[in-house]
Amino acid sequence: MRLEFCWFCSSKIYPGHGIQFVRNDAKIFRFCRSKCHKNFKMKRNPRKVKWTKAYRRLHGKDMTKDSTFELERKRNRPERYDRNVMENTLKAIKKIDKIRHDRAADHIAQRWKPKAAKERREARKELEQSISLIKAPLAIQAQEPAITVPKIKVKVPKQQTLEQPMEE
């Protein structure tokens, strides 16, 4: 079973799926769905459309340089079938898949590191600014006696009772 790749978004196309466009110079373009075909007809550049793999690779969102990609390349030279070679190849494919998955996870973790640090800084800053919402003001003053303001006693005159009722 041969899996083709979409010319526009680089996703896999399984047999019996997708659209094929053959240009006058006999160049074949394969598309996974009508969305990719329509974007191609509108002459959009896949590197500028955010949901394509070309955009993601160009802007550092996906891995671009990795030795595991070398093994995925298409080879047009036929090989003579050998059971041992086929068995070893299938084992190697599983190992390579695991390695690629681990490296992709590491790549994503590296991409998220700056954002996580920034979120922590913002959370710490917000906590410092609104600590009074979490702790009682008296508890904060008890911890920081140098900041306390001296208390001033002010005498408040008693209110005189009015004997006349209010007019409406």
Image: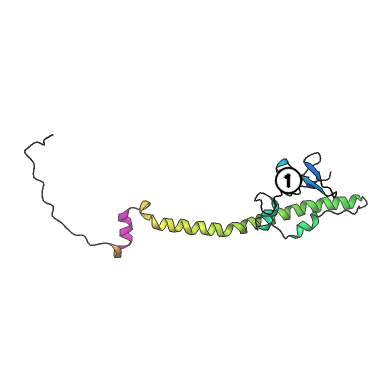
Query: Which quadrant holds residue 150?
Result: bottom left
Q: Position of residue 83 (x, y in %)?
A: 90, 49
Q: Nearer the viewer, residue 61 or 102?
A: 61
The residue shown at (47%, 57%) is 122
> 97 or 139, which lies in front?
97
Residue 64 rendering spot, x and y as whole percentages: 71, 58
Quarter of the picture containing the C terminus is: top left
Residue 140 is covered by the magenta coloring: yes
**Type of secondary structure dominating the magenta stretch:** helix
- Residue 62 can be seen, yes or no: no
Residue 22 locus on image (x, y percent):
82, 45
* Residue 134 screen position, x and y as percent: 38, 52
Residue 69 drawn above or below residue 18: below
| Residue drawn at 8 percent across, 45 percent down | 160
Residue indicated by mark 1: 41
| Image: 99 above or below 14 | below
Instruction: Specify the segment rendered in magenta.
Output: 136-144
Determine whether the residue tagged by mark 1 lies in a helix, strand or loop: helix
The N terminus is located in which quarter? top right
User: In this view of the protein, can residue 118 be seen by the observer?
Assistant: yes
